[in-house]
Amino acid sequence: MTKTAMTSYPTSLCDTPALSDQSTLDSAIDCLMEHLSLDMNGSYTVREVFEILVRTASRVDSIEHTVQSLAGAPSSNSVRYHLEKLDDMQALEAQVNAALHSRIPPKIRKGRHRMAIDLHLIPYYGVPTEAEAPYVYRSEAKAGTTRFFAYATIYVICRNKRVTLGIHAVPCHETLVATVTYLLARLSPLRVRVKRL
């Protein structure tokens, strides 16, 4: 697959030099490879699938468009086939949180911080599978539906930068109080203290 490198910008959250776009991509993929397991078959590798997903997410693009723009990439159907294997939401959530926790900048682990919790709703259309059904969340109508996949994030706001500390797939029966309590409980092993929420 083709690769590009662009200008890097300094950050105040880390003592290491700023990363280029390519080194940021490589670092993100290395982190995913360390913490997420994905069974592959065929001629493509887990790394290639993760590269497509990271590029897609960073550009707010579709998998279809991303694979069309990369030489030698697997088809979008092949990528989706392998993603459908990730059907244990609790295991996936634990792996993603382990990946996030492994890259928390050292300065975040010191002192107390301003934090925020967001609830994100992704419109859902169609008939949910047995694995999806517990995570189809009902809310006010938006984008032509009242059904969504919901996930909540907790993050630190430090020097006007956002550092995500945890993510939680919100089951349809869970209250917002339970979601907030769950996310705050995830902070304990990280030694991150709340100054303001």
Image (cartoon, rainbow, N blue to C red):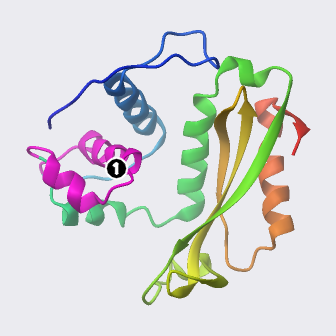
Of residues 18 and 71, the one nearer the viewer is 18
Mark 1 element type: helix
* Residue 52 painted magenta: yes
Residue for point 53% across, 10% down? 16
Work out whether 176 lies above or below 17. Answer: below
- Secondary structure mostly seen in the magenta stretch: helix
Name the residue rendered at 15%, 59% in the picture: 75
Q: Which stretch did the figure color magenta?
A: 43-72
Amino acid type shown at disc 1: Leu
Give percent across and percent down for residue 95: 55, 46
**Which residue shows up at 83% across the image and 48% down it?**
185
Residue 20 vs 127, above or below: the answer is above
Residue 130 in the image, given as x and y percentages of width and height:
50, 83
Residue 13: x and y, percent? 64, 20
Q: In this view, does 143 lie to the left or right of 50?
A: right
Q: Does the magenta stretch include residue 103?
A: no
Vertical placement of residue 67 versus 5, above or below = below
